[in-house]
Image: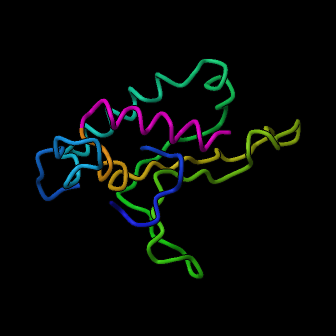
Amino acid sequence: MPPSLPPGLPIVPNGGDGGDGGDGPCDGPFPMSEADFEAAVGDALARIPPELANTMNNVAIFIEDDYTPQAGEDPDTVLLGLYEGVPLTERDSWWDAGSLPDRITIFRQPILDICSSREDVIEEVTVTVVHELI
């Protein structure tokens, strides 16, 4: 199991069959091309509840392979996603006037490391984006 996974966030190359046949994490990362992962992210975004999706004004979604821990962070830190910007709960009337988009980054490798199917990837990305928004 990858080190330091955030609690409550159930969201790769080098082969693996995508599962170990048991209830635990799979033996290796789920194999998925970058294009297939991007398509799965699109499918996940379509599952965001409409009332939450409507609040995603001026929020851009990016995909990166992995998170690089910053100075002072545990080098084993694993993130599935990261929100950078003004939290939706803290925005007010001044915010919208010419602000650059906030950014949600989805980290491909950690998600593939804990998934065993395309459906798992879609579910984990959905959970991760919702977590980053609220």
Left or right of 35: which side holds 5? right
User: Which quadrant is home to the C terminus?
Assistant: top right
Query: Quadrant location of residue 55?
Result: top right
**In this picture, is 111 found above or below 124?**
below
Q: Nearer the viewer, residue 23 or 107?
A: 23
Q: Nearer the viewer, residue 85 or 66?
A: 66
Q: Position of residue 25 (x, y in %)?
A: 29, 49
Exactly how many numbered labels are in the figure?
Answer: 0
Q: What secondary structure is the magenta-colored segment mainly?
A: helix
Q: Is residue 48 magenta?
A: no
Residue at image point 45% right, 70% down: 68
Name, please, the residue furthest toward the bottom: 72
Name, please, the residue furthest toward the top: 50
**In this picture, is 114 found above or below 53?**
below
Left or right of 27: which side holds 71? right
Q: Position of residue 115 (x, y in %)?
A: 30, 43
Its colouring scheme is rainbow
Residue at image point 33% right, 35% down: 120
Q: Is residue 124 magenta?
A: yes
Residue at image point 24% right, 35% down: 117
Query: Quadrant location of residue 93?
Result: top right
Task: Tell me where the magenta segment starts and ends, as one range.
Answer: 117-134
**In this picture, is 20 found above or below 117?**
below
Q: Nearer the viewer, residue 56 or 118?
A: 118
User: Which quadrant is home to the N terminus?
Assistant: bottom left
Q: Position of residue 50 (x, y in %)?
A: 60, 18
Q: Position of residue 98 (x, y in %)?
A: 76, 43
